[in-house]
Image (cartoon, rainbow, N blue to C red):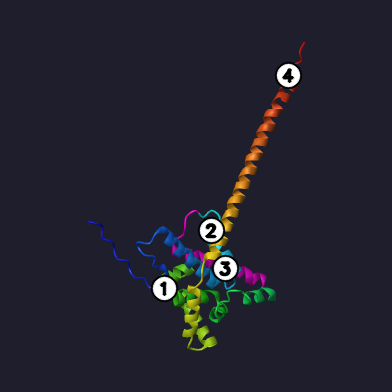
Amino acid sequence: MGRSQRPVPKSPDRNYRLGMDSGRGQRESTRLARAWRLCRLLEPDQERARRLFVACIGGPGRKRALPPRRLDRLILLRARERAGSRSRAGRSPAQEEADRDSDESPPALLRTLHTLPRQAMEAWLLRRLDALDEVQASRAMDCSKSAMARHLAVAYRRLEEILGGNIEDRVSALRAWSDALEPAGAIRHLRVARRRRRAGRLIAALLVAGAIVWLVVSVLSSQPVQRFIHSPPVP
């Protein structure tokens, strides 16, 4: 008699429903697709989103894949750090124009969200677009549930001031756009970065090995000369 399978519990977050019988490759592709989607929502510029994706998925020294919830938290924190660095450095008009002329232009609602305070935008994306519960969203944002609720209230209030009460069509358009995002280009970028990193480590190892061989050869070749110099004279 075969072993009975336990039913898969229903989750409010459609992105975390991986299935008990899914293969390892399917789970990994789902994880990468969700990571790319979140990177793209947090970084409207496609090239910056690729760099964020590579830094979070294939960063140096990362040997084990992070689970989805920890990966969400890492992506949010890295995106927050990069946004803070850009705000301190300032943005040029050419960079802003490049963002607007992107081949994969994001919906207007996403551009509006990026005018909100950073954590208010994050709370709205996690709770409204991804349908995470309070615990999941607060853990991803690295804050308490009450703080996350305050950030979400700020987002709702600001969006109502900017767009009015009816934003359901805009939300549907943003969800359709984000669900259609393909991570293939970002995964190729990740593989190239990993190959470059491996090549760099190999070159460094070869240089170290060459230096060790050169040092050993130098020491061995100098020993007969030293013995000749320090040997007593023949009578």
Q: Toward which corner of the image does residue 188 lie, by quadrant? A: bottom right
Q: CA distance from mark 3 to mark 2?
A: 14 Å
Residue in front for this viewpoint, 135 or 202: 202
On residue 231, the disc is 4
Secondary structure of the residue carrying tag 1 is helix
Q: Residues within 10 Å of mark 1 (few under 14, many from 20)?
A: some
Mark 3 or 1, closer to the camera: 3
Camera sees residue 151:
no
**Residue 120 coordinates in the image, percent (x, y):** 51, 77
Dot 4 and dot 1 residues touching (CB under 8 Å): no
On residue 49, the disc is 3
Residue ID for mark 2: 58
Quadrant for the C terminus, please: top right
Q: CA distance from mark 4 to mark 2?
A: 59 Å
Disc 4 residue type? Ser
Mark 3 or 2 closer to N-term? 3
Camera sees residue 5:
yes
Asked whether residue 179 is drawn in magenta, I would say no
Secondary structure of the residue carrying tag 4 is loop
Mark 2 or 1, closer to the camera: 2
Disc 1 residue type? Glu
Mark 4 or 2 closer to N-term? 2
Secondary structure of the residue carrying tag 2 is loop
Q: Residue at x 63, y 72 (%)?
A: 87
Dot 3 and dot 1 residues touching (CB under 8 Å): no
Mark 3 or 1 closer to N-term? 3
Span colored in magenta? 63-90
**Residue 17 coordinates in the image, percent (x, y):** 39, 68
Residue ID for mark 1: 134
